[in-house]
Image: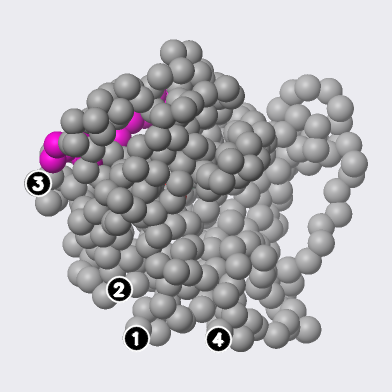
């Protein structure tokens, strides 16, 4: 149990208007959570303070060697006015998996969830209510020793900031165009691909820029060794439905284990849909496409929940999936997950946690 000190802002900001599109990651609430770590004291001084600038030495290790991690989850307002989190314990678990890989001290799971609940509670009036909106929660840890040598830091800051966000696809569930990367790779087995850390994103920017220039919204990564097995998309895991089976790449160490991915697999099993986690090559996807057995392609992640894929390009080959319409399984997954998140459907898996 953390003893969290709360200092409320004396100058609350104006909240966004009801018709504000809430562009992702641009608006921040009135407060933030901070907790410090020192080797002798452990995690200490948990506090909720007004959102604002922090002061760090230019020599702080995070700026030089990137020892940092982050998480992402959402709080949803239900029709009867409750605020629900979706599987925050999974984010707590993943935080510690990432921390172990990056030599960052672990945070007790209950403390992580308590901190999220506490800061969301303080800023509960910022949880937007309109259909498709939510409060995006961004926990992160940075290494702050003022030191230029290479070793794990002895001091850290754990912070949580909050951002009201609109629907990921304001025009509805529009299928996205995906660029299959053939030049760069994101991660390799033994690297940090399964850790949620900024370095993986820094490594991805070059391809993202290239894909955007070509008119594509996201990049699909292939494995770094053979350059032929499917890994994941930008900030989403990927699923294919081929001849009645739902298939997603197995977790081998280079792929981020998504909470949405895990939830989709659980729902497919519940619905008795055959679901396979296995190695899947890009050739197999093209073959299914040519045989007309590639039924659906979709990405999964907290931001968009389910993101149908309508078009993929690999070198000079193009796949046009379902003429750009959303597949029935993608649609049912989206409706079910958002239904549970918003408290409209029974939560038989005990996935939601009330703030
Ligand atoms: C966060 C993330 C995902 C999706 O994970 P969720 O827990 O479902 O939001 C997928 N891939 C990468 C690289 C990520 O950083």
| Whether residue 133 is situated above or below residue 198 in the rendered picture | below
Question: Along the horizontal axis of the image, is 232 left or right of 161?
Answer: left
Looking at the rendered image, the disc whose residue lies closer to the viewer, 4 or 1, is: 4
Q: Which mark is residue 343?
A: 2
Which residue is drawn at the image coordinates 44% and 51% (left, top)? Answer: 176
Q: Which mark is residue 80?
A: 1
Residue 291, given in percent of the width and then of the height, sits at: 18, 31
Given contact means CB atoms under 8 Å apart, are the residues at marks 2 and 3 in contact? no
Residue at (70% x, 43% y) in the render: 142
Under 8 Å from ligand 1: the CB of mark 1?
no
Q: Residue at x 52, y 76 (%)?
A: 127
Mark 1 and mark 3: span between their CA atoms? 32 Å
Q: Residue 184 in the image: x percent, y percent?
A: 59, 24
Residue 272's label in the rendered image is 3
Q: Secondary structure at mark 1?
A: loop
Q: Residue at x 34, y 53 (%)?
A: 324
**In front: label 1 or label 3:** 3
Query: Which callout, 2 or 1, points at the residue further toward the start of the chain?
Result: 1
Q: CA distance from mark 4 to mark 1?
A: 18 Å
Dot 4 or dot 1: first in sequence order is: 4
Region of the chain picked out in magenta, as a range: 241-254
Residue at mark 4? 18
323 and 283: which is toward the camera = 323
Q: Which mark is residue 315?
A: none
| Label 4 crowd (10 A; few <14 / some 14-19 / many >=20) | few
N-terminal of the pair, mark 4 or mark 2, is 4
Closer to the N terminus: mark 3 or mark 4?
4
């Amino acid at each position: 149990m953390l003893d969290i000190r709360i200092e409320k802002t004396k100058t609350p900001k104006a909240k966004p208007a009801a018709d504000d599109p809430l562009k992702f990651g641009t608006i921040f609430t009135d407060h933030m959570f901070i907790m410090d770590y020192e080797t002798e004291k452990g995690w200490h001084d948990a506090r909720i303070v007004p959102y604002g600038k922090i002061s760090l030495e230019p020599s702080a290790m995070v700026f030089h060697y990137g020892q940092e991690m982050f998480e992402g989850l959402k709080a949803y307002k239900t029709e009867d006015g409750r605020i629900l989190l979706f599987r925050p314990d999974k984010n707590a678990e993943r935080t510690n998996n990432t921390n172990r890989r990056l030599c960052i001290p672990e945070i007790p799971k209950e403390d992580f969830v308590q901190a999220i609940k506490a800061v969301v509670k303080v800023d509960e009036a910022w949880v937007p209510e309109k259909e498709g909106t939510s409060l995006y929660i961004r926990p992160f840890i940075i290494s702050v020793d003022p030191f230029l040598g290479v070793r794990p830091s002895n001091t850290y800051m754990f912070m949580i900031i909050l951002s009201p966000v609109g629907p990921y696809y304001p025009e509805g569930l529009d299928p996205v165009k995906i660029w299959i990367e053939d030049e760069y790779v994101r991660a390799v087995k033994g690297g940090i691909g399964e850790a949620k850390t900024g370095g993986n994103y820094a490594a991805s920017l070059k391809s993202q820029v290239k894909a955007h220039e070509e008119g594509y919204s996201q990049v699909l990564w292939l494995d770094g060794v053979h350059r032929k097995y499917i890994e994941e998309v930008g900030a989403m895991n990927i699923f294919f439905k081929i001849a009645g089976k739902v298939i997603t790449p197995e977790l081998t160490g280079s792929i981020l284990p998504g909470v949405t991915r895990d939830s989709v697999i659980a729902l497919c099993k519940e619905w008795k849909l055959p679901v396979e986690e296995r190695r899947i090559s890009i050739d197999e996807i093209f073959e299914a496409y040519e045989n007309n057995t590639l039924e659906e392609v979709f990405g999964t992640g907290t931001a968009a929940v389910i993101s149908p894929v309508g078009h993929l390009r690999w070198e000079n080959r193009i796949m046009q999936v379902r003429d750009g319409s959303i597949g029935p399984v993608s649609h049912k997954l989206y409706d079910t997950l958002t239904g549970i998140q918003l408290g409209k459907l029974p939560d038989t898996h005990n996935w939601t946690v009330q703030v």
